[in-house]
Amino acid sequence: MRLILASNNAHKAQEFREILSPLGIDVVTQSEAGCHFEADETGETFEENAFIKAEAAMKATGEAAVSDDSGLEVDALGGEPGVRSARYTGRHEDSDADRRAYLMKKLSGVEHRTARFVSAICCVFPNGDRIEARGECEGAIATYEAGENGFGYDAMFIPEGENRTMAQMSAEEKNAISHRGRALRKFARLLEEYTNAHK
Ligand code: IMP
């Protein structure tokens, strides 16, 4: 089965493929399908934004499209940056490293550093049907950065029960416990049920 991935984020595309390809799901990014656009993430929840992106890609391609809206919720910051994780500094041109430095500064002197990554997956079919799945990964924000793997806030996030940051883990190790890995495995089960029911 082929699904259009409503994302321009190469790291996300790689994680989708690592998890869904072995299950026989062929993930094609919207730009590989010839659609070059970025839907406005105007929602106030991960679920709303995931739906906005998936629906836009489904309408642009005419094919079933899947998306992930994700982010980091830091308890000491009342859940920030949340849905604003990708644009936390407010400057579009800033890098992941800039956003990590901004968060590190906001947490300077803060002892209680618990946080979680959240991923909301949404798949929209041309007939309007929708499959949704959510995954979370609890952890804490380190007082340092470490590791070269992954992307985004991985280098400063230590998953619960670990002593390494997510950026110090291999792709397999991250996918086994990550918010996106959990959401995608749940999604794959729901997709299988859906396709069996619509044969
Ligand atoms: P969006 O879902 O494209 O709006 O962006 C999600 C943002 O959350 C990313 O740009 C990262 O900053 C952050 N994020 C989401 N998932 C991860 C992850 O697996 N590791 C590190 N950062 C992540």
Image (tube, rainbow, N blue to C red):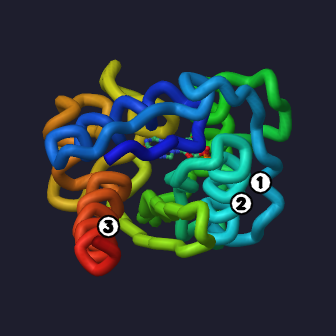
Identify the residue shown where x is 77% and y is 33%. Answer: 37
Q: What element carries label 2?
A: helix
Residue 112 horizontal/vertical position (percent): 46, 65
> Mark 2 and mark 3: span between their CA atoms?
19 Å
Give the camera-side residue of 138 and 172: 172
**Mark toward the viewer: 3 or 1:** 3
* Marks 1,2: beta carbons within 8 A: yes
- Residue 69 vs residue 57: left or right? left
Identify the residue shown where x is 62% and y is 72%. Answer: 128
What residue would you read off at disc 1? Answer: 41
> In the image, what residue type sits under mark 2?
Ile
What residue would you read off at disc 2? Answer: 52
- Residue 174 vs residue 183: left or right? left
| Earlier-in-chain disc, 3 versus 1 | 1
Q: What element carries label 3?
A: helix
What residue would you read off at disc 3? Answer: 191
**Mark toward the viewer: 1 or 2:** 2
- Would you say residue 111 is visible in this rendering? yes
Residue 24 horizontal/vertical position (percent): 20, 44
> Mark 1 and mark 2: span between their CA atoms?
7 Å
Identify the residue shown where x is 65% and y is 24%. Answer: 34
Mark 1 sits near ligand 1, with its Cβ under 8 Å away: yes
* Marks 2,3: beta carbons within 8 A: no
Check disc 2: other Cα within 10 Å, few if <14, some if 14-19, many if 20+: many
Residue 86 horizontal/vertical position (percent): 66, 42
